[in-house]
Amino acid sequence: MSSWKKSLRSDRLFDMVNTTVLMFCILVVAYPLIYIVSASISDHKAVVSGKVWLLPVGFDLTAYKTVFSYGLILTGYLNSLFYMGVGTLISVTLTLLAAYPLSRKEFTQRNVFMGLFLFTMLFSGGLIPTYMLVRSLGMLDTRWAMLLPNAVGVWNVIVTRTYLRSTIGDELYEAAAMEGCGDVRFLVSIVIPLSGSIIAVMCLYYAVWIWNSYFDALIYLRSRDLYPLQIVLRNILILNQTDGGMIKDISVMARKQGLADVMKYALIVVSSAPLLMIYPFVQRHFVKGVMIGSVKG
């Protein structure tokens, strides 16, 4: 009886410690997010003077009005949505087409191709050869430059292959083959419907990667009409800082610098909002897909 009480006390102590640690972690993660949102809708004087530490002070949407008054913001948003949507579709499709044969034991050359995939993780041609390749393919200053050069992630292929190997059993494949089901139909009719979790995870991975990507646009794109949102926001910050440095009136320069500080927070909210809205819809698949795809196999 005494040992049972000691065990109960130790469990309670563990629960208390665990809850305290988790609450601390939640505060560490949540506070920067709350602060950024609060600062973005606060008066710029309050932000500069350090009066904003949790809740908004002097509700003001000037930063958002300034951001969205820039003509290329809407164009950048639409371009980023296009790159994210089409790019994710292309990347997930290619990842599944690569992972499925690599997961089948019937494919005798799978180790050779897996070695080639792994080789690209360790060695790459570098920036200049990649740029020359994109230029020789005629993709410079086109939307294809944002969609094709980094369409497949080798790590994602490995995770997807492991998931398919662990989830789609050989018995299911043999039963389908006995009914005259070929590889293409087996992939479309059986593998894809049973792989909703890993597909959701891959969609999230690729969507986040493409949405946050700006270096490819900086290298390959010249037309402002093709710029993604990240490049547009970067240009806004640079132009705002440049204009502030050219102002001779100290009071005006201080006011614009304060507005620039608030705009930084507004830009973070603007650029992060789409992904924050997408994540809740795939979160329930995230843990299952990643754990099965990375631990087993």
Image: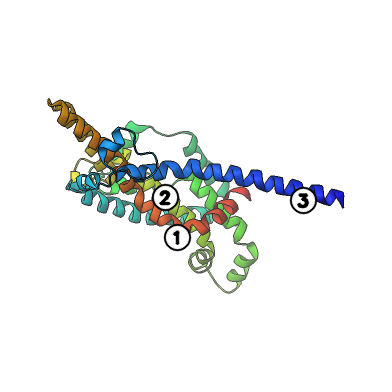
Query: How would you rate the neighbour count of disc 3 (Cα within 10 Å): few for under 14, some for 14-19, many for 20 or more?
Result: few
Query: How would you rate the neighbour count of disc 2 (Cα within 10 Å): few for under 14, some for 14-19, many for 20 or more?
Result: many
Query: How would you rate the neighbour count of disc 1 (Cα within 10 Å): few for under 14, some for 14-19, many for 20 or more?
Result: few
- The three-letter amino acid code for the residue at tag 2 is Tyr
Task: Give the residue drawn at x 39%, y 39%.
Answer: 53
Q: Earlier in the sequence, mark 2 or mark 3?
A: 3
Q: Which residue is mark 2?
A: 206
Q: Which residue is mark 1?
A: 281
Is residue 20 found left or right of 48 in the rendered image?
right
Residue ranking furthest to the right: 1
Residue 297, horizontal then vertical, whole percent? 63, 50
Q: Which residue is mark 3?
A: 8
Note whether residue 25 is visible: yes
- Report the Cα–Cα distance between label 2 and label 3: 46 Å
Pick whichever, 101 or 238, lies toward us.
Answer: 238
Q: How many marks?
A: 3
- Report the Cα–Cα distance between label 1 and label 2: 15 Å
Position of 267 relative to 108 (above/below): above
Q: Earlier in the sequence, mark 1 or mark 2?
A: 2
Position of 154 relative to 238 (above/below): below
Asked which colour scheme the image uses, the reply is rainbow
Q: Earlier in the sequence, mark 1 or mark 3?
A: 3
Say whether marks 2 and 3 touch (CB < 8 Å): no
Label at residue 261 = none
Residue 14, horizontal then vertical, whole percent? 69, 45
Pick whichever, 142 or 15, lies toward us.
Answer: 15
